[in-house]
Image (cartoon, rainbow, N blue to C red):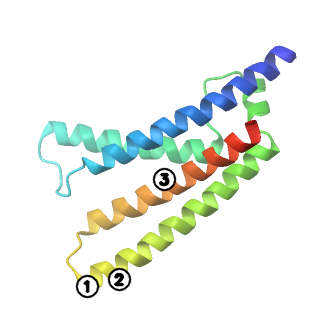
Amino acid sequence: MSGVVEAADRLSRSRVRILTVLMIFFAVQQANQPVTPPTRAVEWVGLGAWLVMALVLLLVLQTGGMWLRPRAARELSNDETTRAHRGEAMEWGFTGAIATAIAGSVIAALTEMPALVALRLVLLVGLFVATFRFVALEKRALG
């Protein structure tokens, strides 16, 4: 049993590092996305990669991730504290997304902000805030 506990601890620590890197990649990838509909194959691939990364981040935040790991280690690494951290992170992400949507609505009323830019900004801020809140809470809990 101690091997499973050690594996769960390693998984929890690696999840924090991986989520940090994924969120940075997602933000950088977001900055490189065009604001026009894709027309070339490379643009479709970029859009698909962005969509997959957004969905993976959301699913990791929602479920705790580690889908390919042993069930016992997954359950230990998704303990009550981690579930509470994920819940708080999702609350913060939701608040960030709504605040961004409100600010975007004001900006769009005063300027010609493309809807695609506004939507991507809401997604970016929501996922960014939620991910980094979860990472911060987990780092503090893991020591």
Q: Residue at x 53, y 56 (%)?
A: 129
Residue underneath mark 3? 128
Amino acid type, mark 2:
Val
Examine the rendered structure and indicate whether residue 107 appears above or below residue 57. below
Where does label 1 land, which residue?
110
- Which residue is rendered at x = 32% and y = 67% of the image? 118
Q: Is residue 66 visible?
A: no
Residue 133 image offset from top left, x and y in percent: 61, 52
Q: What residue is rendered at 66% in x and 30% in y?
A: 13
Q: Which amino acid is tagged 1?
A: Leu
Amino acid at dot 3: Phe
Q: Is residue 121 left or right of residue 84?
A: left
Q: In the image shown, does 50 or 134 lie closer to the viewer?
A: 134
Pinpoint residue 27: horizontal percent, then vertical percent.
Answer: 38, 47
Q: Are marks 2 and 1 in contact (CB under 8 Å)?
A: yes
State how far apart marks 3 and 1 are (Cα): 26 Å
